[in-house]
Image (tube, coloured by chain):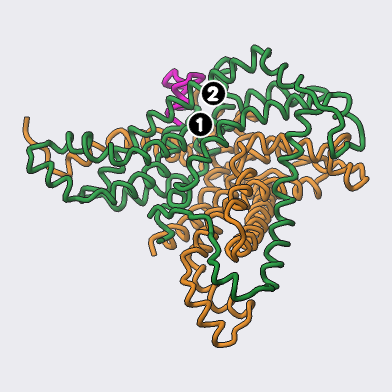
Amino acid sequence: MRKLTNGQFAWLLMAPGVALFLAIIAYPLVSALVTGFFEQSLVRPGRTFVGLANFADLLGGDFWPVLRNTLVFTIGASVIPFVLGYVLALALNSGLPGWLRGVFLFPWVIPAVVVSFLWLWIFNANYGVLNGLLGTEISWLGQPGTAMAAVIVTKTWSSFPWMMVMLLAGLQTMPKELHEAASVDGAGTIRRFRSVTVPHMKGIAGIVFLLEFIWNFQHFDTIYVLTGGGPAGATKTFAVAVYDTAFKGFDLGHATALGGLWMVLLLVLMVFYLRKEAS
Amino acid sequence: MTVTLSASVPTTSARRRKPVNRSRVAAWIAVAVIGLFGLAPVYWLVVTALTPDERAFSFPPSLIPTEITFDHFAKLAENQQLFGYLVNSVIVSVITAVLSVIVSAYMAYAFAKFRYRGRRSLMHLVLASQLFPQALLLVTLYAVFSATGLLGSYTALILSFTTFTLPLCVWMLKGIFDTVPSTLMEAAAIDGASRWRTLHTIALPLAAPGLIAAGLFAFVRAWNDFIFALTLADPARQTLPPGLVHTYLGEFQTAWPDLMAASFVVSLPVIAAFMFLQRYLVGGLTAGAVKG
C-alpha cells in the first residue's frame, strides 16, 4: 500500500466526524433553506415550488410577533444572568471561600427539562410556592405579561451560574499588581473596577455574553415545557414557532421559511462571535 | 487553553491589610442574595419530593416540611413505564458517549498534530456548527431519518447527539493534544512506529483524562436532550426528559411530588458527572477564548 501523506492521514482521521457533520448538520441545513421556497407537508410526499410566497406570508404577519418575542426573551435572559453572574464573580473573587463557587453550579447542571418542571411547580397558580409567599393568586404562566417574565426568570436561573464561572475565570487571570498599583495611586473600588477590571474583562465578557445571546436566540426546552409558546402566542419564539409549524401544523414550507429568516438573523450574530473568537 | 479553575484562594496578606473591609461585606451580601435565588428552588425541589401528597396540595404551602415521606421515590421504583425510559436514556447516552469520544479524538488529533489544506476553515466550521438552530435542523432531519428508515430508532438519536457534541469535545481534546510534545511523537517515528500506532500508544493514553471528560460531557448532552428525543424517537424508545413530560404533564392534575422525586433522580447522574467535569468546563466552553 502506498504510504499516505500527512494531509491524507489527517483527513482519514477526520472522515467519521466530517461525515456526521455533512449528514446531520450541513445537508439538513441546506435542505431546510431550499424547502422554504416550496409548499410541502410533513406527512404527504411531493411538493410545489411557490417562490417567495411563504416568506411573503410570514413577513405579512406571523414573523413580527415572533421576532418581538424572541428579542424580548433573548435580551432579558441574556442581560439579567450576565449582570447576576458578573456581580457574583466579582464577589467570589474578592477573597470569599472557594467552595461557594461549587454551590452555585447546581441550577446550571440540572437538566433543562427538570428546571422547567421545578419552575412550573413554583409558578403553579393553585398550590405554587411563589403565590404562597406573596399571598397572591396569580396565574403566572396563564397571562401574556407575566408568562414572558416567568420564562425569562426560569432561563436566568439556569444560566447565571455558567456566566459566573466564565467571568470568574477571566477575573482570576487579572494580574493583582494592576489593582495594587491603582490603589497606590488613590483609586477607589468603583474607579478600579471601571479602569482596571472592565478593560481586562472586555474580551471574555463579550464572548460570554454573545454566546449566551446566541443560545437564547434559539432556546427551546424551557419555553416549550413552561408555556408551549402561549398564552395566546405571548412566548412564541422562533424555536417554538418553527417546531409547532412543522410538527403540529405539518407545514414544512412555512416552517423552513421562518427558519430561513431566523437563520439570517443568527448568521449576523455568528459572524460577530467568530470574529471575536478569532481575535 | 484549558483553564483550570483553582477555587479563588484569598491571599492571607490581602486579608491582613484590610481588617474591616467594606467591599467584603458587600461581597457577602451579593452572595447571600443571589444564593437565595439560586438555591431556594433546589431546596423546594427536594422538599416537595419528600412531602406527602395531602400536604403538597394545600395552600399556602409550608416552607419547612412538617412530615417527611419516601413514598414518591418508592412509587418511582415500581413504575414500569419510567423504567423503560430510564433504560432508553442509559442506552442512548452511553453509546453516544463512546462514539463521541472516538470520533472527536481522531478529529482533534488531526487538528492538533497535522497541518494541511482546509484545516483552518474546517476548524471554524466545527466551532460555528454548535450555533446553528437545532429546531430548524430537526425539521429536515426528521425527513432525512424518515427517508432512510431510521426514524424512531436509537440510531437516529445517537447519530444526532454525537454530532452535536463534536464541537465541544473536539475543541476540548484538541487543547489536550496540543500539549503532547511533538518530540515524543518524533521519537516514536524514529523507533519505527507508524502514525497510526503513535496515535494509539502514545497520544491517546496521555489524553486519557480528557477523553473521560469528553465522554462524560457527551453522556450529559444525550441524557439532557429534550427536543430531539421528543421528536425523533418513537414512544417505545423515548428517553427520560420527554418521557417525564408524557408521564406527568398534561394530566388533569399533575402529581407534583412524584414529578419532583423523578426530577431529583434524573438529575443525579448529571450532577455526579459535572463534579468530575468542573475543571474542563471553562476551557471547553469558550474553545480557546480564555487564555490562562
| Left or right: where B4 falls relative to A265 | left
Give the label on residue B89, or none: 2
Q: Which chain is orange?
A: A
Residue at label 1? B222
Secondary structure state at the residue bearing disc 2: helix
The percent coordinates of residue B276 (x first, y second) are: 49, 40
Between residue B54 and residue B276, name the one nearer to us.
Answer: B276
Between residue A266 and residue A277, name the one nearer to us.
Answer: A277
User: In the image, is residue B149 part of the stretch drawn in magenta?
Assistant: yes
The percent coordinates of residue B205 (x first, y second) are: 28, 37
Q: Residue at x 93, y 45 (%)?
A: A135
Name the chain letter of the residue that bears numbered label 1. B
> What crowding class fits label 1: few (fewer than 14 Cα within 10 Å), some (14-19), or many (20 or more)?
many
Q: Quadrant of the N terminus of chain A?
A: top left
Q: Could you tell me if the residues under marks 1 and 2 are in contact, i.e. CB atoms within 8 Å?
A: yes
| Main secondary structure along the magenta-highlighted residues | helix
The percent coordinates of residue A192 (x first, y second) are: 58, 78
> What crowding class fits label 2: few (fewer than 14 Cα within 10 Å), some (14-19), or many (20 or more)?
many
| Left or right: where B30 falls relative to A261 | right
In this orientation, does residue A31 appear? no
Span of residues in magenta: B144-160
In this orientation, does residue A8 appear? yes
Name the chain letter of the residue that bears numbered label 2. B
Secondary structure state at the residue bearing disc 1: helix
Q: Is residue B59 above or below residue A94?
A: above
**Kind of residue indicated by mark 1:** Ala
